[in-house]
Amino acid sequence: MTLTSCALAWGSGQYNWCSKAAGSVGLRIDEAFTAFAAAVNPNNPSHPLAVLKNHNSATGTTSFGYVWQLGHPSVPIVLGFWNTTLAQGNSSSSASATLRLALQSAYTADSGNAGFGTFASTILAGSRGLTHYTPAAGATPVIANLAGWLGIAFDDTPGAEWFLWAHGPNYTDLYTANFVGLLLRTENGWAPCLYRGSAYLGLSQTWDRYMLLNGTLTLMAFPSTPTGLIQQVRNGLYLVPNNGFLATGTYLVNGISQRPRFPDCLYAGNNQISTPARLLAKAHLPAGGGGARFYQLGGSSSSAIDFWYREEGTPQLLSGWGSWESVPFTLYNPAVDSTPMAFCEVPAPATFTCRPAALGDYLNEWGPSVMGLPGVEQHPLWSTQATGGGGSVRPGSGILWPRGTR
Amino acid sequence: MVATVSHFSRRGDAVPYPLPTVLNQVQAELESWVATVNSQNPGQLLTIFKKPADDAVNHGWTIKARLLAETSPGVKAELLSQWVMVPATGNITNAVGRASDHNPAGGNGVHGSLSAGTINAATAAYTITQPLPIGAVTARSTAAGQEYFLFSLMQHTYTNRMGLPIFIAKDANSGNWVIGTISMAGYAALAAWNGLLGNYVYAKTNDPWWPDYLSGFAPYLFRANAAMQFLTPAFNPVVGPLARYGPVTLPNDLGVWPSTARAFGVWLAPGQKWHLAMGPSGLLVQIPAPMP
């Protein structure tokens, strides 16, 4: 097992998504993904990763991105992401960059879509990724004079491989947007999860079904941040399928829920602050925290979910890359940022099962209070009391009423 | 594994009112369980400091748990948990904290009081004068490393009339005891030793377990085993503004479920695994399958 964790930072005017220049952000993502694919493909002959398109594929001046193959023995998937215009929005619905997930059989790697190929159909197409900074809704997008960053991390442990990539312009206000992507190797194949602001997008395969996340659903349940904390983030995260996107019948009552688990170095939680002061942040934990370094990935405004990445020790760097520390994140300063923040570790559960509805089905789940007498009669404990146990019982003979001693 | 379950529920029309009898029955079981687990855990003994029969006015328990963890070299950490009910008023006080913050003469009858920790002051949360039935179940295990003792009490199905007067369980991560109570009003007072932090942590007041379901969205997810989440650092004065909380994992028999029918609701998981809801906060315990 090798963990590779490294980053790059671009100074003012140097960060440009729409550039094919050597060392530009798009080609650096390509470089990192290629390195990840080379590391994991030998252990995944039936699930090979490959770059189908990258920034160099762009034939126009406004479309830049990538198309990756996520191999699978029967249903290989294609993940495509590129912007179509330079007019980026500032929300998940106004972004013009589109993310596409499709069966590879529906994809033709031709010159369509400004060089990124043609999709006969998609499993999912959503405007969820942002590549450029837009100062405010409706305002002119800024292309020049941006500073920005790119962080990547990947683990090639067989069977538990993952690839994380996050990039964006440096935060300057609430409308700054960034992009976080995670690719997980599950027992059924590759599961991508993509995040921007408070919008999620993802795909996982469970048995023979696709399960999708869209931008309307939280990734998982997050309890409200305790009073007095600026943020409480947790690890032990999973991709949770979105019921609204599912074909009917995907959930079996009492089915065992199979959920792709995020690596433990990823944390998420509600953000309680609406100023950008704590965006592009990092935190160095004192000795009690194991000396870990935390970096904020999916910065967003108040009441949305933030992602944080934990790095420990001295990780391996890709050649020519710097450390995450080389990115000018704002260091959380306990003396100034007096509002506390908690990084919580949540252990892996032994089992998940699920039910599809809010209320009990009264077959596998019931409370005596909602089921009344039938609930009591089915109850493993109270049923014994109804027929013996702790109270008076129906007499075996004689009159029923008035009853004798109680 | 499944819990060993005892069922002490009573009709409410008995005279005299049967609550003290029920509490004493639970106490007898608790004593027996404590004796067994203490023999298995000589390095972290449990002590029943006060029991229901010790005070005719202030019913309840004050329990001390010595931990394996040390607060300083040679000094074992000690936690103290209280659940005290005054039937005359229906008031319940529940609290957890360091044993060193316990003042035996601080009130609550013979039970005394804690000066720090998570303290839920006396709240009217029991209707002792009404002839209502009492739901009372204990669930316990003495399996080494997976020990727990739970006592769930319910007066009726309102969410403020079901509680967890006794919660003692072993943290699978650190091997230390987790101890506490949940009042009939749903206020948790739970404490654990957090190995990563090297300090005590207290459970959040009304969400003591990490949820692993989507609030408001299907599917609703059951998780075994349960894990605890923690309170604000304001209650952990030694912890700085940046804190990394290690996991506290409860025994395998315990799970979490966003059930709409809380205490004593039943959930039949795949594989004929029967679970019983204990207390008001969605904690489930695996129980033996009922006889057909």
Image (tube, grey):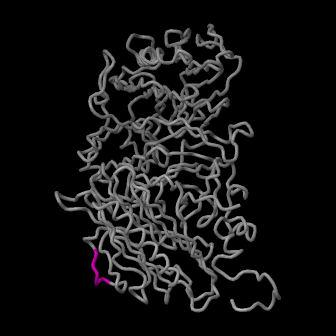
Say which of B163 and A224 sits in front: B163
* Quarter of the picture holding the N terminus of chain A: top left
Q: Is residue A317 above or below residue A369?
A: above
In the image, residue B121 lies in the stretch drawn in magenta: no
**Residue located at (70% from left, 20% from top):** A121
Count of numbered circles on the image = 0
Is residue A27 visible in the rendered structure shown here? no
Q: Give the magenta range.
A: B102-106
Which quadrant of the view contains residue A397?
bottom right
Is residue A113 visible in the rendered structure shown here? yes
Q: Position of residue A388 (x, y in %)?
A: 68, 76
Say which of B226 and B116 sits in front: B226
Q: Position of residue A207 (x, y in %)?
A: 64, 31
**Residue located at (64% from left, 87% from top):** B13
Q: Is residue B166 above or below residue A130?
A: below
Left or right? Give the position of A247 relative to B46: right
Which SS does the magenta portion mostly show? loop
* Quarter of the picture holding the C terminus of chain A: bottom right
Say which of B143 and B248 sits in front: B143
**Residue located at (28% from left, 58% from top):** B68
Q: Position of residue B80 (x, y in %)?
A: 33, 70
Which quadrant of the view contains residue B201?
bottom left
Left or right? Give the position of B11 relative to A270: right
Q: Is residue B36 above or below residue B270?
A: below
Q: Position of residue B140 (x, y in %)?
A: 48, 64
In this view, which residue lies farthest toward the left? B73
